[in-house]
Image (cartoon, rainbow, N blue to C red):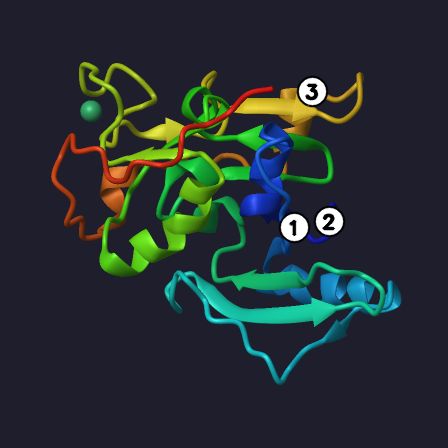
């Protein structure tokens, strides 16, 4: 993962923050085309094989995912989804996800969350609200997460939790938990910075009513 600047995202990365909420099925690896060959070779060396007869449908279209491979290993229940990103920085794909809830990553050095306050409290803001994306959100709602169309009341541009705010992967609001005691936020982010994003700048259409709670999930039960 380190050599190819590859990250894990999707439900497997969310699981790191909510280990009691659900069990992820597949693991989604995001890697740029320049690192893809090395990473695929590494997976083959570990016994993974392509499942070509079962092409995975990509949620995000060809704009930022060039190709999606699906690999399996005999004796292992979950599948590996290999998403080859158009951009060299896999975070450029992560910030285009349809909810902030899954804008998290496991890298070779750390676990990272771009919207930790909401993600840790089990909430996500929907960035694209269409019939298709709502279908994709169902599993998260079933698992007890809450999704809404707006960040909580705030003064625009004063907080990281605003669609109009330009964020930096190096800003204080990005949560980075290094795997080792000697690891630092700077080291963990060195392969992925500088990187900036703004949710509203992504040119996506939103059909949701501002401020409306999108869906009402089952009540979350804590033990
Ligand atoms: Zn705002």
Q: Quadrant of ligand 1?
A: top left
- All told, the count of numbered labels is 3
> What x and y, as percent, mark residue 30?
59, 54
> Which residue is depicted at the point 52% across and 30% down?
113
**Residue at the spot x=62%, y=62% of the render?**
81
Asked if disc 2 and disc 3 are in contact, CB closer than 8 Å, the reply is no
Gap between marks 1 and 2 measured at Cα: 5 Å
Say which residue appears at 34% left-offset and 21% top-offset: 160
The spot of residue 223 in percent (x, y) is 60, 19
Q: Earlier in the sequence, mark 1 or mark 2?
A: 2
Give the distance between the C-alpha atoms of the residues marked 2 and 3, in whole angstroms: 18 Å
Q: SS of the residue at dot 3?
A: loop
**Which element type, helix, strand or loop, lies under badge 1?**
loop
Q: CA distance from mark 1 to mark 3?
A: 18 Å
Q: Which corner quadrant of the image does residue 152 belong to?
A: top left
| Residue position marked by numbered label 3 in the rendering | 184
Q: Which residue is mark 2?
A: 1
Q: Nearer the viewer, residue 104 or 184?
A: 104
**198 vs 191, nearest the viewer:** 198
According to the image, label 1 marks what residue?
6
Q: Is mark 1 within 8 Å of ligand 1?
A: no
Left or right: where 221 falls relative to 7? left
Query: Is mark 1 in CB contact (under 8 Å) with mark 2?
Result: yes
Secondary structure at numbered mark 2: loop
Position of 206 relative to 179 (above/below):
below
């Amino acid at each position: 993962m380190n050599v190819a600047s590859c990250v894990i995202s999707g439900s497997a990365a969310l699981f790191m923050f909510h280990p009691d909420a659900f069990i992820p099925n597949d693991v989604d690896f995001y890697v740029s085309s320049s690192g893809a060959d090395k990473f695929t070779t590494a997976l083959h060396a570990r016994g993974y094989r392509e499942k070509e007869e079962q092409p995975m449908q990509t949620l995000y279209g060809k704009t930022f995912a060039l190709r999606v491979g699906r690999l399996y290993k005999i004796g292992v229940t979950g599948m590996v989804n290999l998403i080859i990103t158009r951009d060299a920085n896999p975070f450029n794909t992560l910030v285009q996800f349809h909810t902030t809830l899954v804008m998290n990553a496991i890298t070779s050095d750390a676990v990272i969350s771009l919207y930790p306050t909401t993600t840790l409290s089990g909430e996500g803001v929907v960035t694209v609200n269409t019939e298709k994306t709502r279908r994709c959100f169902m599993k998260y709602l079933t698992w007890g997460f809450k999704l809404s169309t707006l960040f909580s009341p705030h003064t625009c541009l004063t907080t990281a939790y605003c669609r109009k705010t330009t964020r930096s992967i190096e800003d204080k609001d990005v949560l980075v938990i290094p795997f080792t005691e000697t690891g630092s936020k700077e080291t963990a982010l060195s392969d992925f910075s500088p990187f900036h994003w703004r949710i509203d700048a992504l040119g996506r259409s939103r059909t949701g009513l501002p401020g409306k709670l999108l869906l009402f999930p089952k009540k979350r039960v804590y033990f």
